[in-house]
Structure formats: C-alpha cells, structure tokens
Image (cartoon, rainbow, N blue to C red):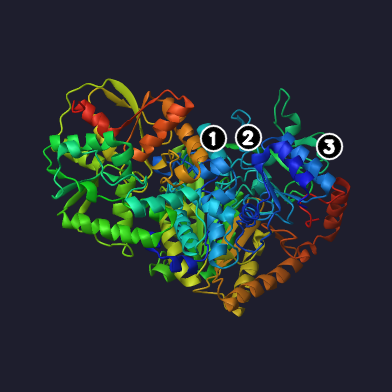
Amino acid sequence: MSDENLIKGLKAIVGPKMVSTSPTVCESYAYSFSLSIDWVTRPEIVVMPTTTQHVSEIVKLANRYKVPITPKGAAGMTGHGGPLHGGILLDFIHMDNILLIDDKNMKAVTEPGCSFFKLAQELFKKEMILPTAEYGPGPNVAASAITPVNGFGKTRYGRNIDLVEGFEVVLPTGEIVQIGSMAYAETDFGPFFRYITGPDLIGLYTQSNGAYGIVTKIAYRCIKRPPYWSFFTYYWPLEKIRQCTEVLQETTAMELFDVHINDKWKFEGFKFLTGVSLVPDDCYFCVVFSINGFSQQELEGKRKTVEALCSDLEGKELPGIAESFFDAWPTFFCPPTHPVAAQLADAGYKVTKGGYMYMYDSMNYPLSWFPQVYEKIMEIAQKHKIHGPPRLTVFDGFPMKSQVMCSQTWAFVNRKDPEWMQAIHDSKEEIREWFGKRGGTYQQCFPPVLPDFTWTNQESAHALLKRFKQFLDPNNILSPGTF
Amino acid sequence: MPEFRTWNLDQFKDWIDMCLHCGACYARGPIVPHNWRELPPHEYAAPHKKCPPFEYFKFKNHSPQGRQILASLIFNNRYEIDEEVIRSFYSCTSCAMCNDICIPYQPLYTVLAMRQEIVEKGLEIPSRLKKITDNIQSSGNIFGRKKHPKTLENFSLPETGEDIFYSGCYATYLQPETALASVKILKSAGIDIAHLGDKEGCCGEMLKQSGNMKLFKKTAVENVEKLKQAGAKRVIISCAHGYSTFKNDYTNPHVVGVLPFEVIHITEMIASLLKQGRIRFSKNLNQTVTYHDPCFLGRQGGVYAQPREILAAVPGLTLKEMGRYGKWSYCCGAGGKVTLNAFPEMAKETAKERLLEARAVADTLVTSCPTCLAHLKKTAETEGIDIEIVDLSMLVATAMELSD
C-alpha cells in the first residue's frame, strides 16, 4: 500500500502538500459524522484533489496499484465520513466552488466539496432555495447525494437525491463523463433537464457510496423562494395516533413547505435534563408545519386550511416550539452554535458521559404504516429498556409528498456503560429484522457499514447492481464492499 | 455548559469526545444557512476561512475537529503522542474562533489541555518554546533580555500606586513606543500612573500556551503578589495577551482565583476617559483606517466596541472594516506567540493574508496589541505590502499631539 511510487505519483498529480501518509493525519480522518455506528477505519493516504482532472489521474493511478479509494462522505452523514476500507481517502474540502446559479431556470451546479450552507446562502441572495433542510457546514453537497443518508434532513419535497439533476463523474477507469442535466451543461440550454435521450443514469450514482464513480460536479433543481413564511405546531395524545397520521397524509399532499413529526420524548429529554417541561401533559406527538407563500394572503389561506384540518382531527395548537426552531437567531440548523444546544450538551454529558447516537438507521416506509412502525419501535425499545429517561428513545419523522415516511429513532447512550450500549444494539438488530421483512428500506448507511442483510428484501436489484459494479470497476477499487 | 476554561487535566482525561464532526469549526463557508426569511446577522455570519493552521497545513489534524479526535484517543489511551501529534497541537493559534462557533465543546481548551499533557509527560515541545520558557525563568521576560527595562525610565514613574501600568514583554522590549504612548495618554488624562519597573515580570502567557501550567501558576501567583504589594487597585495593560492572561487565566480558581485589583486594557481605559472628557484631540488625522481586532482582546477579552469608539472620536478618521472583523476577525498569525515561534512560515503566511485583506480597504491598519503590531509590521516589510501599521495608543497620542 505505502508503495513509494504510488505516493510519488499522487504527489506529482496534486502537489506534495496535498498528500499525506502520516498515521496521525490519517487517524484524524478515520471518523464519521454518523451517530448510529462506530465505523472507524483509518485511511492509509489522504489526498486533496482540487480539479476533476486530478481525480481522474488519481483513479487511474489507484487502478494501477489496485488501491481502494473512498470519496470523503461515503461512510457517514452529510459528507463527513471516513473511508470504507483503508486505502486512499479523497477529501474534497478544497473543491468547494459554486459553478452556476441560474435564477431563470432554477438550477445550481457546484463542485463536490461545497457545503449546503454555502449553497443555501448564495441561492438565497438570488431569491431561490433548495427545498431541503439544507443541513451542514462541511463539504457535503455531493457526498449527501452519493451516500444513502441523503442529507441530514428532508422536507415534504423529499430527500436531497430527489433534487439531483446531473452529475459529472470520474468513472473507475478514470474517464470523465457528464450525465443527467450535466450532459447539456456546456450547451446553450445549460443543465436544464435531468433526462437525456435514454435511460436515467443519475440513479446509478445516488446512494451508491461512490462505488460506480466519483462525483466531481453536481447539479441541483431549486425553487423560487417565497417571501412569506410561517411556522407553527399542533399536538395529539398517543391514543389519537390515527388522527395524527391522517393529518400527515393530508398535509403532505398540500402545497406546504414542510411537515415534521416528533414524539414527546424529544421534549421529555429536555425536561429530564433541565427540569423544565416544554409541552403540556396531554401532548404525545408534535407536528411542526412550515408554510410559505408569495403573498400574505396566500400564507394566511394555507395556514387557515392546515389549522382547520388539525382542529377537525382533534389536534391542539402548541405555540413556541416551531418558532424557536426556525424563526429566532440562532436557528437550530447548526446545533453547536446554539446556546440552548450547548446547555443540553452539558446536561446530556452528565447523564451519558459521551454523546448521543442514533439508535436505528433512518428508515423509509409508507406513511400509512406510521402507526404500526411506531408501535413496533416503542415495543422493542421497552423490551430492551431504552424507553423513557434517561435512555429516551426519540422518534423523528419526515413525511414526504410521495406519501413515504423517512424516520430516524435515536436514544441517548453512555458509551462507558456496556449494558446500555448492548441494549441499544439489541434494539437496533431487532427492529431491523422486523422492518426488513416488511419491505422497509434504509438510508444513512449501507454495507459494509451495515450487515449484508440490508439487501435481503431487494435481492434481484442488488444482484444487478453487483453486475454493474463488476463491469464498471473490475479492480473493485471504488468504495469496495458495498456492491 | 461546562466551564472548560477552569478544567484541570484530569477532567479532560475523563471527558469523552462528544464532537458531532459537523465541521463548522474549520470547514469553509457559513456555519448557518438562513432562516428562510433572512441571511444570518453578523453574530452568526462566520467567514469562509476560519482556522489559520488548517488553511496553511491543509489537513484535518491541524483543525479543531481533528485535534478533538486525537485528544479523545490519547486521553483514552488509544493513541500515542508522536511528533505529528505535537505539531498538530502546537500549530493552533489560540485565536479562539472555534470556541465562538462551537459553544458546547469549546475546542481550544482541549488543545491547551493536550499541550499540558505533552509537557507533563516530559515530551519535547517545539525548541523555540522551550527556549522561551528558559528565558522567562532566567530573565523574567520571553526574550531573555537583562531585567532592566529602559522603556519608561524617563517618566520617573513611582513603583507603587493604585493605578499600575503593566507593560509586558513585547511593549517593554520590542515595541516600547506603544508603552510610551499609553503612559503619555494616561498621564495627560490626569491618572497617577505607576509602574513596577525592574520588578515587573513576564505575565507567563507563553508558559500557559506552551503547556507548562505548573510554572505558569507560580508566575501568576508571584505577579499578583507583587502588584498587591505595590498597592494596585487597577492594573492597566496595553498588551492584549497580558490582558487576557490576567483577566481569563489568573482568575481561574486553579491558578490565582479572584484578583485583588481590576484589570483594564488600555483601549477600555482610553474609551472611558474619552467619555469623561478627560482626553481631547487637537489634531485632524484625515485618513481612512481599518481595525484589526487582536484575538486575545476581541474573542478572548470581549473588547470590540471600545477601540471603535476611540477611532470614531478621532478627528478626520474614517474607519472602514475588513470583511472579517469583530467576532470574526482573522488571526494575524502570531498565534499567542506560539505559532510565531514554532511555525514562523505559517505565521508569516497568515499575516500576509490579513495584511492584504486590510490593504484592500485602507492604507492604514490600526491594532491594539504589540504582538500583532510587531508581527504585522515585520511581515509587511518582508513581503513588500504597502500599508501603514499603527498601535491605537500611538494613534491616539498623535491625535492628542503628545507624540513628541
């Protein structure tokens, strides 16, 4: 691996200052943002390309030496991942340019290391937005598309990958190709449309862990930013879960910006840590609505419609929650900058002695199945004694207009307490088995980070993906272990 | 949130890394997007580049996040301190921008704790820092000069009094004109200022920054005792580093604790005297300047408004801010004098970037820290960057026509 000629070759491509084999440097890249797993793999070489041509030359060289390459972000959330299997880790932090913001056709093209926060601000200046939660200050714009996590948050519009329209990709052979709207990027029309004359190739690269090629440019579809916004919350008791589900189904079908659901355990955690209760005693499910409009009249009309629906289905208004999340500065988009988050981190530390983690991988299932899935999650959590304080299994749901629920369930964990750790892992395995049998799919992590049984409910599709992999990457150098 | 500033090494060793690895502390670009209605206000509008050592060395081990990872591993006996680890922890400029971004974890304090661990394990710290430690012990100043400062002798200042001017190593030995200007201003405003003279010793900041907490504590206790014996009620400091050391580090209960006197930076004093009408300007300076917030006065001392109030009061002076100012001011590169000594090339490159940023908006850069002043001046000279660099006290003295 540490073949001197390989290192020399890499340094010749990107410059000597952009390559490191130092164990200490590599150790600092071994970790991922992911909170659900302890996937720690130290790369043997960290390389920082600054151009697509660099990436192409690196891939060719890696083929010659049969060294694995992971684009940073392929193991973890929103672009902060370490490598899957040693070898070369490409860090795209220095490829962070925004290449195009087209406010007439509502498109944006960036390099892979651009952050969502940076893109979001530049779009905002042109009265545009990406209809996602736009989470993340790191180099994550491309990473969130190639990793299954699809970004940290979703909105009613869907996941980040639903907004991707084009890629520039360096294939495992080192060839550079443009697919989707990027195929038109250099023409008079620009990157206007996801579909080329033929099959849609974008899908081979989204949620791929970078196994079929390395993304070096990415095109996103944006929307016009409405100037009027309102954020508000309604709540339901546990026994009204059916009515709550109906509201989710109805409102995600409307032209709202976002609908988001949490259970009361999110707030019980705050109460447990601080003694302050943020929600009434009869509150179990909290649904936050984010609505917008191009006029005050439109905004008020939408709000009245949603409020009437919630009231009809026995919801009660809960002022303050949504407003504190979005309206006030600082927002909660970057928790480390938030003083309340800081206080919670301190209080949480006293209980957990080291962070929280997501308990289950984020899961996708029909929105209509929310009551059954929720009930099962909590049943398993109770069985393994991670329900309620201090372990606090918290439900975090993103219903989408496709009538699919993306949800993640997390719990606090004391990493120094083996019994506590084991309880969480046992819960995780049990829910996966139940969920997988019903056809559920995962986001956030794939094999090799997760066990292979991730694929058991989609065997023929997985077999085809494996064949693609063998064809495109015969030396199996790009993010090996996924397909 | 945890009072990391006052934590001892054992507390850090018990601490498990809770970093989310979000990258806000060093990654390029904003730390928040927008709130759908507006872009973030200045308080949350972090600059594109944040961490000087990361920008210079490129790799994450030279970033707050990378250091958090390494510290957590080392404190949990999962990784050994090697030469690269030492480089990673001593390349930090202590500019504290990461602390302002990441409120829960305050990464700078982990860096300082790891430096302490390195020293207590008897490992080799960068040689120039070791030399400075020796200088402080043998001569009472970081330069190893003989302990007879001539800087203020023409004033025949008393060695005792309620208001004591603490000049510090840089202003005493390297930038005496800043100390002279400060004393002239104070005397002109009717302050009966005293100075410890030969008895004044180094504040010990470099000991703390190097990780030698035992010697730092000893130095701090001695300094406080000397000032107490001299009758100090107010200690006025023109050095941002000395100011932060007295105000933030001496007050740590594990060092000295509550001080028997008030600690005031010269800019706070001048701003206060201006408000009282005890300082009057007689000369129109007729120039456009920009102000460089020293890290140890701004982020570490919370003094942002007073220097600007002073500049606003000087006749004919227009202040034009750089893109990165106030809370988001970029380090000059001297880095608590640690990077200046341990990584001079990085210190120069960082200063160059800051000087070019200043040059884009004004012909004159004003600062209020003799270390920043000396380092920026030297870099401007060696790099041929055409910009005048002045200390705020000197500028005030000029506008008061006290200079000659």
Question: What x and y, as percent, mark residue A6?
Answer: 78, 45
Both on one chain, marks 3 and 1? Answer: yes
User: For residue B318, what is the image quadrant?
Assistant: top left
The residue drawn where x is 57% and y is 63% is B73
Residue highlighted by disc 3: A198
Residue A270 location, quadrant: bottom left
Q: Nearer the viewer, residue A324 or A316?
A: A324
Give the quarter of the figure containing the C terminus of chain A.
bottom right
Alpha carbon of mark 3 to alpha carbon of mark 1: how far? Answer: 33 Å
User: Could you tell me residue A368's position as x and y percent?
Assistant: 65, 61
Amino acid carrying mark 1 in the image: Glu
Q: Chain of mark 1?
A: A
**Which callout, 2 or 3, points to the residue nearer the camera?**
2
- Mark 3 or 1 closer to N-term? 1
Which residue is denoted by mark 2 in the rendering?
A108
Q: Amino acid at mark 2?
A: Ala
- Residue A139, percent from left and from top: 61, 45
Where is mark 1, residue-wise?
Answer: A122
Q: Horizontal placement of B386 versus B400: left or right?
A: right
